[in-house]
Image (cartoon, rainbow, N blue to C red):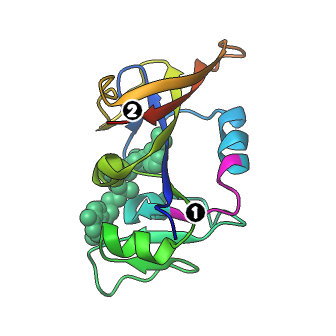
Amino acid sequence: MNHPEIILFIARADNGVIGDGDTIPWRLPEDQRRFKRMTMGKPMIMGRKTFDSLPGMLPGRRHIVLTRDKDWEGDGADVASSVENALKMANAPHIVVIGGAEIYNAFLDKADRIELTEVHSNPKGDIKMPAFDETVWEEITREDHEAVNGKPGYSFVTLKRKIG
Ligand SMILES: NC(=O)c1ccc[n+]([C@@H]2O[C@H](COP(=O)([O-])OP(=O)(O)OC[C@H]3O[C@@H](n4cnc5c(N)ncnc54)[C@H](OP(=O)(O)O)[C@@H]3O)[C@@H](O)[C@H]2O)c1
């Protein structure tokens, strides 16, 4: 098989926050619909903490959960003990990585594409990601959405790894 495409799906606020404790400090239904549409049918790799924070299994997608705990089991989840092990298990042409921060950091060097939702607010939160290095990542598309009904504005941005 050719090298699989590894895609990170990340929603990040302007101040770098991606999470607060075990939750995401915003709710953007359009982002959730886009996430569902773009990840449907693809294996999803995630950290154990992110899996624990899900309201339940996300339909139509394999859940591959990274943990160092040999005894851990999650209903309906496939358990992986390392990055390499998770990728081998996923064994698909497109593999999505859905967080959280520890897992994004573990896969960043291997990722081909980042589907980034920039959330234009500065929420409180203890889980952060730095901005993406412009010498490594090239912005391919950007779709801006204005703030409405008390929800922050946001932008859907596709970043692709620069060649060479
Ligand atoms: N905004 C977004 O797009 C987004 C997306 C997803 C999550 N989040 C947020 O991110 C936060 C969670 O992120 P987090 O960084 O705290 O946790 P996480 O990345 O979801 O999970 C961390 C856990 O993954 C396991 N792990 C990490 N690296 C590993 C490796 N190399 N090999 C094997 N297992 C490994 C460990 O599990 P064990 O402790 O079991 O060993 C570790 O405790 C939450 O606030 C969540 O809401 C935000």
Please name whichever residue, 119 or 95, is drawn nearer the observer in this view of the structure.
Answer: 95
Q: Earlier in the sequence, mark 2 or mark 1?
A: 1
Residue linked to disc 1: 93
Query: Is residue 43 magenta-colored?
Result: yes
Who's the residue at 55% across and 25% down the image?
140
- For disc 1, the neighbor class at 10 Å (few under 14, some 14 to 19, many from 20) is few
Please name whichever residue, 162 or 114, is drawn nearer the observer in this view of the structure.
Answer: 162
Please name whichever residue, 141 or 11, is drawn nearer the observer in this view of the structure.
Answer: 141
Left-right relation of 26 to 67: right
111 w.r.t. 47: above or below? above
Please name whichever residue, 84 or 31, is drawn nearer the observer in this view of the structure.
Answer: 84
Residues shaded magenta: 38-44
Q: Can residue 56 be seen in this view?
A: yes
Left-right relation of 83 to 54: left
Q: State which quarter of the image contains the C terminus.
A: top left
74 w.r.t. 55: above or below? below
**Numbered label attached to residue 162:** 2
Who's the residue at 61% across and 35% down the image?
27
Left-right relation of 102 to 79: left
156 w.r.t. 29: above or below? above
